[in-house]
Image (cartoon, rainbow, N blue to C red):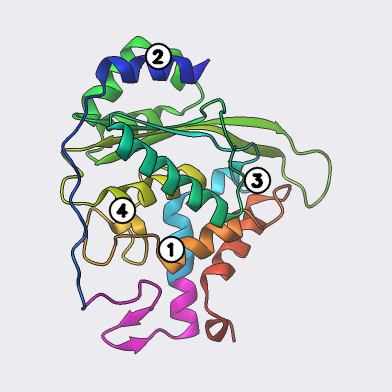
Amino acid sequence: MLFPRLLLAAALFAQTPAAFAEPAADATLRSPDDIVVEGERLTREEAKKRANAFIRTLGVAPGIYSQDSVARWTVRLCPRALGLSDEHAALVEGWFRDTVRSSGARIADGKCDTNVLLLFVDDGANFIKLFKARYPGQFADMSGPDIRDLVELDKPVRWWYSVRRTSGGLSLIGPQTLRSIEGATIVIDVNDAEGATLRAVTDYAAFVALSGIRIRAEPQSQSILGLFDDRQGKRELTEWDKRFLTALYTIPHERKGRYQRGRLVGALLKPDDKE
């Protein structure tokens, strides 16, 4: 099993980090869902182009999976935070659970078998290398490029998933393969993430865990994914993030990715953008 081994590895490598920064008041912050360029609203076509670019960079329904479904959770999520004090771990797990509920995904209540690990470590790159060397079989489902990205990309947060693939059946509108997330591991390098609040990092980790996105996804100014590029105004899930997650867990799962991609793009547009 993946998670007992990860729990063991976390016990060996995770260290209790210094406290994350507290959020400071900033009266100049804009609403993250305001799609504005130099004070002017984007046209419908510009807004649609930006929404398409957002979905494309996330990689939730890339061309190679256009005949398959998007990957999302079908089982209840059970998070566990390690590498923090008990008090801070409880806060992180509580915030994470709130995000899962608001997205429409299902959360496990009470005692449960962990399937989402939030690992706070001193050196994310080293943790990944040590774990990969000790448990190489746990990355068997990942492609070579994805493994290289996980190990080599310099990111404050790294992640990977356990995805179950089953036949989508013979329906004309159904996918060739139904992709269901059954586990996620999020590794947070507390030194690289220094300056971000614990709540912001939790929102980032929750978005990643729920979305099934590729680690190479580019930071986006209208998303929590921009947290480590520009921390001003990226302290929580944005309206775009919330719309995306709600749509991801509302659209029919047993559909081809190309159909689902269109629905996700549409969900990001405001009503007046669609006219």
Q: Are marks 3 and 1 in contact (CB under 8 Å)?
A: no
Q: Amino acid at mark 1?
A: Ala
The residue type indicated by label 3 comes to: Ser
Label 3 or label 1, whichever comes before in sequence order = 1
| Residue type pointed to by label 4 | Ala
Q: Is 117 in the magenta?
A: no
Nearer-the-camera pick, 170 or 104: 104
| Mark 3 or mark 4, earlier in chain | 3
Provide the secondary structure element on which disc 2 rests: helix
SS under mark 1: helix
The 10 Å Cα crowd at callout 4, few under 14, some 14 to 19, many 20 or more, is: many
The residue segment tinted magenta is 28-49
Spatial distance from mark 2 to mark 4, Cα to Cα?
31 Å
Question: Which residue is label 1 attached to?
Answer: 53
Residue 33, quarter of the rendered image: bottom left
Q: Position of residue 264 (x, y in %)?
A: 57, 62
Residue 200: give its label.
4
For label 4, the SS is helix
Q: Residues within 10 Å of mark 3 (few under 14, many from 20)?
A: many
Residue position marked by numbered label 3 in the rendering = 69
First reached walking from the N terminus: tag 2 or tag 4: 2
In front: label 3 or label 4: 4
Question: Which dot, 4 or 1, sits closer to the camera?
Answer: 4
- Camera sees residue 184: yes
Work out how far the residue at label 4 is from the one at label 1, CA to CA, in angstroms.
Answer: 23 Å
Disc 3 and disc 4: Cα gap in Å? Answer: 29 Å
Instruction: Check residue 136 in the rendering and tell me which mark sits there, or answer none.
Output: 2
Please tell me which of labels 4 and 1 falls first in the chain.
1
